[in-house]
Image: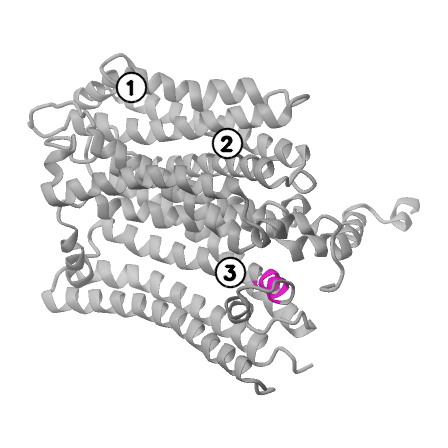
């Protein structure tokens, strides 16, 4: 992995980390929210089966999004010039 | 590949490099609509929902109609981009970006309608804190969140090589484009990773999009309200969504073709293919509408029939028959023969479908609420200037977002056009040959 040379490049790289970190934070926020709703349903004994059923479908989808974002960032930004 | 420039590429970069007077006039006109919407919302925020035409029993009016309509339009990106990309339809190349942008913009506008519909928007926090997954409304919130994230990712990924072109060619916004380009240089590894990520998202975004509009329909069909409690509402809504999405895409294509001179890229053949798709969707829409009303009529439940006749010949007849005219008769008349004046015919049909599909959403929501199953008094919904203002503001905001997007990014994918020229032509030839029987097989 080649490190950025100039100040401008270093700033760009930092902002790219912020950009991807923001995307991960957004996806993580939604997953956290869904988990919170499951825990609330369990705590209140308020038909938790519905919450768990929907969460079982929803959470993996969001995890795939985060996987795609990390994959692109790794292969395009961090390791893009390897070969 | 990255060094070869298309002869017409400057046309695509011109709106980003230069800003003409037309842009400012466009922004000014749209701002008037947005200000009208902002004023309407301010009045509603301070005075409460009493300033609107919403009342008992009609608690959902223009806002929920707009919500369903805008979420429906968002299917443009899925169908045109993802399905055509996966099926390797080469004519998609100048179209995909426009479709994907529509999806992202309207999802924000559509989801915003729910906030506008809340008399107490501060209570939105209660959904985050105490939301219950037994409610289809929360299924909506989850599926729309997933769709929005998928659509944003699916819009952004194919833009990376184009952003790199802007980074290298433009003198302005260097930092902005450098960050978003993610260090793209067009290496083999980068290209392979990007293509793989786009393919994953294309596969993922199709079922998510279909689920989104199915879930939107569940908000209605999970109730026992007359003419809402239907098992075909899911596919009916999905078909309507794709139908309106294609129409919105065609209108956007024709508008930007005209104002940015994109004629070399958006040719009559593109409008012919999209017109054929629109015709197929018009026939499918008619099939679902006919089935929906036929089964209701055959069942002849008194509560159902009250709503049924209110639509056919009662107070809602002008909207119902205008819907049939706009969604079926006009598209059929325009699209059956696309010999000459293709663009004009397709535009007429598309504008009609946009109006017709908005009316369809209205005609599904309001008549049922006007004649409820429970013994509430019946009522007719009359929107006030507040709802008209919100609706005008929402359309204005969508158009403004779209216009602003074209000032920052190319509205047609530059690298995909290059790829089409350099790789696509050969690939199509090879693929075509692979479909046909081998010469050796023929001789034996």
**In this view of the protein, which residue sits in the foreground, B307 or B415?**
B415
**Residue B369, quarter of the rendered image:** top left
Q: Mark 3 Cα within 10 Å, few/some/many (few <14, many 20+)?
A: some
Q: Is residue B142 above or below residue B109?
A: below
Q: Which residue is mark 1?
A: B297
**In this view of the protein, which residue sits in the foreground, B421 or B299?**
B421
* N-term-proximal mark, 3 vs 1: 3
Mark 2 chain: B
Q: Which residue is mark 2?
A: B281
Tell me residue B437's x, y (percent). 82, 46
Q: Residue furthest front?
A: B21
In this orientation, does residue B102 appear?
A: no
Mark toward the viewer: 1 or 2: 2
Mark 1 chain: B
Answer whether labels 1 and 2 touch (C-beta < 8 Å).
Answer: no
**Residue range highlighted in magenta:** B160-167
Tell me residue B143's x, y (percent). 34, 54
Dominant secondary structure of the residues highlighted in magenta in the image: helix
Tell me residue B9's x, y (percent). 69, 51
Q: Which residue is mark 3?
A: B156
Q: Residue at x 52, y 46 (%)?
A: B99
Q: Is residue B312 above or below residue B15?
A: above
CA gap, disc 3 to disc 1? Answer: 47 Å
* N-term-proximal mark, 2 vs 3: 3
Tell me residue A80's x, y (percent). 62, 77
């Amino acid at each position: 992995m080649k490190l950025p040379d100039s100040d401008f490049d270093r700033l760009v790289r930092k902002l790219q980390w912020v950009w991807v970190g923001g995307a991960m934070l957004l996806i993580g926020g939604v997953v956290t929210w869904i988990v919170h709703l499951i825990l609330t349903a369990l705590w209140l004994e308020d038909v938790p089966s519905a919450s768990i059923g929907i969460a079982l479908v929803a959470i993996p989808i969001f995890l795939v999004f985060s996987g795609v974002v990390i994959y692109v960032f790794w292969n395009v930004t961090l390791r893009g010039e390897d070969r | 590949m990255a060094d070869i420039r298309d002869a017409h590429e400057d046309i695509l970069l011109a709106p980003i490099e230069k800003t003409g007077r037309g842009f400012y006039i466009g922004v000014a006109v749209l701002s008037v609509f947005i200000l009208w919407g902002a004023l309407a919302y301010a009045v509603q925020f301070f005075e409460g929902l009493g300033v609107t035409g919403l009342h008992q029993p009609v608690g959902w009016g223009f806002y929920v109609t707009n919500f369903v309509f805008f979420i429906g339009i968002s299917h443009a990106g899925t169908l045109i981009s993802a399905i055509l990309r996966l099926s390797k339809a080469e004519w998609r190349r100048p179209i995909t970006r426009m479709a994907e942008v529509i999806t992202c913009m309207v999802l924000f506008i559509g989801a915003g309608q729910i906030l506008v519909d809340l008399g107490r928007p501060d209570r939105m926090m209660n959904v985050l804190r105490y939301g219950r997954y037994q409610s289809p409304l929360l299924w909506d919130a989850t599926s729309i969140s997933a769709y929005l994230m998928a659509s944003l990712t699916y819009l952004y990924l194919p833009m990376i090589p184009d952003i790199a072109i802007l980074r290298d060619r433009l003198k302005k916004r260097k930092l902005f484009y450098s960050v978003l380009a993610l260090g793209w240089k067009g290496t083999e590894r980068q290209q392979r990773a990007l293509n793989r990520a786009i393919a994953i998202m294309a596969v993922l975004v199709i079922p998510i999009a279909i689920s989104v509009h199915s879930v939107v329909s569940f908000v209605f069909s999970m109730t026992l309200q007359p003419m809402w409690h239907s098992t075909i509402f899911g596919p009916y809504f999905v078909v309507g969504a794709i139908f309106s999405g294609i129409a919105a895409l065609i209108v956007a294509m024709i508008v930007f073709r005209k104002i940015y001179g994109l004629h070399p890229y958006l040719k009559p053949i593109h409008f012919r293919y999209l017109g054929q798709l629109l015709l197929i969707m018009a026939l499918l829409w008619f099939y679902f509408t006919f089935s929906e009303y036929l089964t209701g009529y055959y069942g002849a439940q008194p509560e159902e029939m009250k709503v049924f006749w209110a639509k056919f010949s009662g107070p809602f007849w002008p909207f119902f028959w205008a819907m049939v005219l706009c969604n079926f008769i006009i598209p059929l008349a325009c699209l059956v023969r696309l010999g000459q004046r293709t663009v004009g015919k397709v535009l007429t049909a598309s504008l009609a479908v946009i109006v017709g599909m908005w009316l369809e959403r209205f005609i599904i929501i309001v008549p049922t609420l006007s004649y409820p199953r429970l013994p509430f008094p019946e009522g007719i919904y009359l929107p006030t200037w507040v709802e008209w203002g919100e609706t005008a503001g929402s359309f204005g905001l969508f158009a403004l977002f779209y216009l602003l997007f074209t000032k920052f990014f190319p509205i047609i994918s530059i690298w995909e056009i290059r790829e089409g020229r350099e790789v696509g032509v050969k690939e199509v030839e090879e693929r075509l040959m692979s479909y046909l029987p081998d010469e050796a097989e023929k001789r034996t």
